[in-house]
Every structure is written in structure tokens, then in C-alpha cells.
Image (tube, helix red, strand yellow):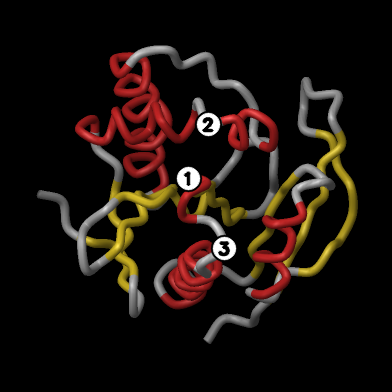
Amino acid sequence: MTMNVLETERLSLRRLTPDDAPFMLELVTDPSWIEFIGDRGLKTVDDARAYIVDRYVADYERHGFGLYLVALRETGESLGICGLIKRESLEDVDVGFAFLPRHVGRGYATEAAAASLEHGWRDLGLRRIVAITVPNNLRSIGVLEKVGLRFEKTIRMPGDEEELALYSVDRARE
């Protein structure tokens, strides 16, 4: 059993493991993930297991943080993922999240994103955190604004034609 990295009133956030592959496959093949984040080409649980190891576990090893599995503290039910990401194509660490549609609209993303930001300030000593989203992802934009990020500019990631909205928040180190 993996230890929780973060806890909130209702949620626990912990590192993803290869055992989370069935959940990850459900998440990344959901139509809303594909619409707003993109098709990762995962078709099987084995694909999802490799994706977790190559993407998420590698981030934990490389940076000491990453996207975490978000679960209900009371039941342990997996809801989504949330955390901080260091992308080579962005100067700053960014906050990211995705939840299964059946768990949307209950404030879980806002609660997990706020905890992730606090983790960045308190534990990682970050001064600035950003987020990227497609401009029509109004639910994600709403979460970003609730946790204090504001629209800064539109950007294009290397090798990508799609314009993304970059949101940011600055905070002096404490």
C-alpha cells in the first residue's frame, strides 16, 4: 500500500502505481479526457500500466513530485488524478487534474488542486505555478480561477498546432 502524499478533508492523494492501470485506462479513454487532453493511444490495461511507469513514476523519480491518484478518504474510491507537473516545454511547474465524469461537479478537483498548490508553496518552495488548458474547457478554467490562477496568455506547445490558455499564480516564498 502506498502512503498518501496529501490529504484534504475528503480526499487522499497518493503516487500512482502500476496496480492503478485499470483505473488509468478508464480515465484516459473517457471521451472528456480525449476531448480536452488528447488521445494517448492506450487500448489495454498493459498499455496503461506502461503509461503509468513511463510517465508518472518517472516524474516522481526525476522531480520528486507529479500527478497523484485522487481517492475518497472515506471509501478509497479512485476519482481522478491531480498534482504538479514539470514539463520540459514550460518554464514553470504546472498544476493539472482530470476526473472521471461521474465525479465531476462535487468540488473534488478544486479541493485537490488547492492542496496541490499548497504543497508546491509549502513543500517544494515554488514561487510561481501555471496551468494549461484548451480555451473551451470551461470546467477546468473554473477550477483554476477558484484556486487563484488567472489567465495570462495563449501559447502553443512545441510540435502542437492547438493554442492553449496559460493561467498562472505567483506567491512569494514563505
> Seen from this angle, which residue lies furthest bottom?
174
For label 1, the residue is 100
Expressed as whole percent of the image width and height from the top left, the position of residue 76 reads: 22, 57
Give the amino acid at mark 2. Asp
**Outermost residue to the front:** 102
Above or below — where is 141 with respect to 159?
Answer: below
Q: What's the distance in space between the residues labelled 1 and 3, CA to CA?
A: 11 Å
Question: Residue at 65% across / 79% down in the picture?
Answer: 171
**Mark 3 lies on residue:** 105
For marks 3 and 2, give the CA distance: 16 Å
- Quarter where residue 13 is shown: bottom left
SS for dot 1: loop
* Left or right: 62 in relation to 129: left
Left/right placement of residue 144 relative to residue 173 reads right
Asked if the residue at tag 2 contacts the one at tag 1, i.e. Cβ–Cβ closer than 8 Å, the answer is yes
Q: Which residue is mark 2?
A: 30
**Amino acid of disc 1:** Leu
> Between marks 1 and 2, how big is the CA–CA gap?
7 Å
The residue that appears at 55% across and 69% down in the rendered structure is 110
- Identify the residue shown where x is 39% and y is 40%: 62
* Residue 117 to residue 133: above or below: below
Looking at the image, residue 44 lies above or below residue 37: above
Helix, strand or loop at label 2? It is loop
Name the residue rendered at 30%, 63% in the picture: 72
